[in-house]
Amino acid sequence: MRTILQLTPYYPPHLGGMERVVEHLAELLAHTNEVRVVTTTLGAAPPEPPGTDTGVRVRRHRAVEVAHTAIAPGLPLSLLRAPRSAVLHLHCAHALMPEQVALTARLRGQRYLVHLHLDVDPSGPLGRLLPLYKRQILGRVLRAAAGVLVLTDSQGAFVREVYRVPPERVFVVPNGVGPEYFRPAPRTPSARGTMRLLFVGRLSAQKNVSRLLRAMSLVREAVQLDVVGDGELNGRLLLEAEQLGLPAAGPRRVRFVGPLLREDLVRAYAEADAFVLPSDREGMPLVVLEAMASALPVLATDVPGTTELVRGTGLLTAPEPGALATAIDRVALDPALRLDLARASERAARGYSWEAVSRRVEEVYDQVYGGRTGGTGGRP
């Protein structure tokens, strides 16, 4: 039996796609391994007890968040106390934790894996420092890793070319979708007059819900939008919706639902007619997989991370409000098109499951750590 440390700055109930990916993997891997999640207290109060009914032990370290970065001084203690043979599986979409893990692993002569969920773009006042951080710090962390897990082939090519990670250390492991989301596509076009449109995601700059609100102000057909999620831009987006004349009730309303989890989230997908994602950039959006499994037509901006998943299944638009509004109107006006897109989503989703993803992750562990007993303790 392996000891596996899933290392992540955020973990449910903190909202986000990466958080739910870690949760799914941890729970599945715990069926045959000892799994510990090492994370922070951000977004979780109170912390869970050491043992849970899923078999996953969650250790939360006190932290503060500065410029979208979790700072948890005590986190290296969990790494120092872990067995030297433990699998160190780092989930990466933010700064600071990667270098903490890399430094601790170097001091102990351990191998570690980096699961790259998103290569973020600069944002905020400190965004100008991000290119320097990527070049001088993150690149070194990735090159020193025993393996880098990426979500798509294009992301793998990016990691090899930009960060100069050796090809033999790059492993493509897609996201998955749980069985609770799967439902069959309808057999006949919907006769409903008003289309119920759904967005699910963190209300952050990267998701660009502002673009979606501006698109909704241009939509001509009867469309009702539910925004599911929470985040630092929540108040600003509520104000923007009011300024754009988007009411919370009526045939062309925009409703901010707040965060939904588990069965409530599954129900939100089941009650929608179509799904929309207006992001600037993605890794491999978990919410799109969930929408496809729910047999929803998918509309999304044609941006890195989303294009590869949606092309040939849903509608991709230029990342600007007018193009997005045109696509929304097109889907709202044409029930037959919605039906075709729903069936395409259902077909595409069949190729993804968390069970298959967890098996692929264990194959990576076997290759990097040499079988079921864990690592050798040496550096790569």
Image (cartoon, rainbow, N blue to C red):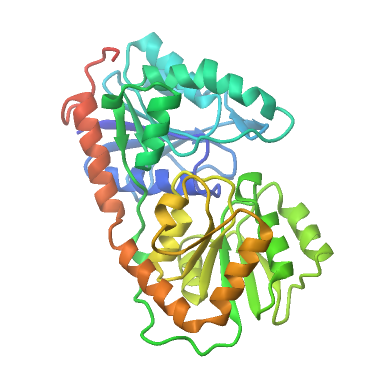
Based on the displayed image, in which of its 4 quarters is residue 35 positioned? top left
Q: Is residue 319 left or right of residue 359?
A: right
Query: Looking at the picture, how far across and down is residue 285, in whole percent?
Result: 46, 51
Closer to us: 320 or 145: 320
Quadrant occupied by the N terminus: top left
Q: Answer with left or right where residue 133 lies relative to residue 104.
A: right
- Report the residue at 51% width, 76% height from top: 273
Task: From the top left corner, tell me how far across and down residue 322 is, in percent.
Answer: 68, 62
Locate residue 152: give its quadrant: top left
Q: Position of residue 26 (x, y in %)?
A: 35, 43
Q: Quick one: quadrant of the C terminus?
A: top left
Name the foreground residue: 356 vs 24.
356
- Quadrant of the image occupied by residue 281: top right
Query: Is residue 36 shown above or below 321?
Result: above
At horizontal 54% and vertical 23% (from top left) the residue drawn is 134
Which residue reaches farthest left?
371
Residue 377 picture location, percent across and down: 26, 15
